[in-house]
Image: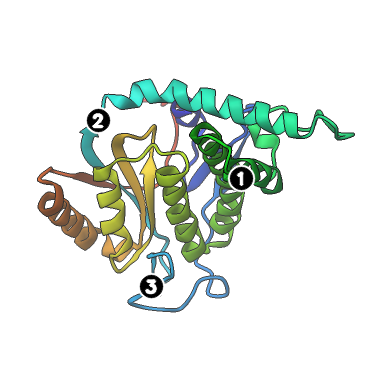
Amino acid sequence: MDQFVSSAALPGHLILIDCRSLNYEAVKMGEYNTTTTDDITDTATADGASSSTGTEKPVFVICNSNVQHSIGGGEYPVRVRQCQEATTALQSIHDDDDNDNRIQLLRDATIQDVEQLQIRASDESSDSVEKVIYQRAKHVVTENGRTQLAKKALESGNWVQLGTLMNQSHESMKYDYQVSCEEIDVLVQIAQGFEGVYGSRLTGGGFGGCTVTLVKKDKVASFMEYIQSEYLKQTGKVCDCFETSPGDGARIVDL
């Protein structure tokens, strides 16, 4: 996906990729919308994202935990296998349905389908593997749903909703997909409690690396200073941060 975005990126847009068809859509960051964004200052939303008034578009701040756990490389194929097992399990549930070819990939499942796996996993006779398979399926299906909602939030300038979705995404990656780590969780927790932050989440492959945080433009400098200080206090590690906004991808430049 990194190579895809680097070639397709447009200023002021995020790229929505369909990984099955490889079609993509450039989603423009909308203008601040007072009808869809809560007009609240210094108040945290239910999941920890702060809401702030203002008309300037927020920016993204990347925070590098400077942690790379070796477990990450080995866990990636495990997640692939678990998602494949979840797909097979969902297909077996619907073997007797008239539309039994509906679920070709895990992305084809609905949350109602996944709840069938939850029923299996909650049975006293089920083993831990079934519970893990349910968690992996839940993450993929709900994350796809959040991505579609995030597109609408971006287009409408509903930064509070977008931040909420980012927070929910991190919770899912932490508990259902289990690809976060202590240091990343610390960064996310610090960010979510800071005034002017709409949302924060793990980005990349997990088990270390970076977080991405949606921050009110006029709070960026104070946010970066705060998170670097708090991260050092809580982990003893240095956190590198930088502000970024969507820009052009690779292109020919006439000099």
Q: Which quadrant, please, contains the C terminus?
A: top left
Q: Which residue is mark 1?
A: 118
Query: Quarter of the image holding residue 17?
Result: top right
Would residue 63 be seen by someone viewing this image from the given angle?
no
- Disc 2 or 1, which lies upstream in sequence? 2
Q: Which residue is mark 3?
A: 52
- Disc 2 or 3, which lies upstream in sequence? 3
- Disc 3 or 1, which lies upstream in sequence? 3
Q: Is residue 3 above or below residue 16?
A: above
Q: Which residue is mark 2?
A: 68
- The mark lying in front, picked from 3 and 1, is 1
Are the residues tagged 2 and 3 within 8 Å (C-beta)? Answer: no
Of residues 250 and 51, the one nearer the viewer is 51
Residue in view at x 41 percent, y 79 percent: 40
Residue in view at x 12 percent, y 55 percent: 229
SS at badge 3: loop
Amino acid carrying mark 3 in the image: Ser
Amino acid carrying mark 2 in the image: Gln
Marks 2/3: CA–CA distance: 33 Å
Of residues 128 and 17, the one nearer the viewer is 128
Residue in view at x 26 percent, y 44 percent: 182
Q: Is residue 65 above or below residue 42?
A: above
Amino acid carrying mark 1 in the image: Gln
Asked if residue 189 lies left or right of residue 164, the reply is left
Q: Residue furthest front?
A: 125
Asked if residue 50 lies left or right of residue 234, the reply is right
Question: What percent of the width, then of the height, locates residue 65?
Answer: 23, 41
Q: Residue furthest right?
A: 98
Are the residues tagged 2 and 1 within 8 Å (C-beta)? Answer: no
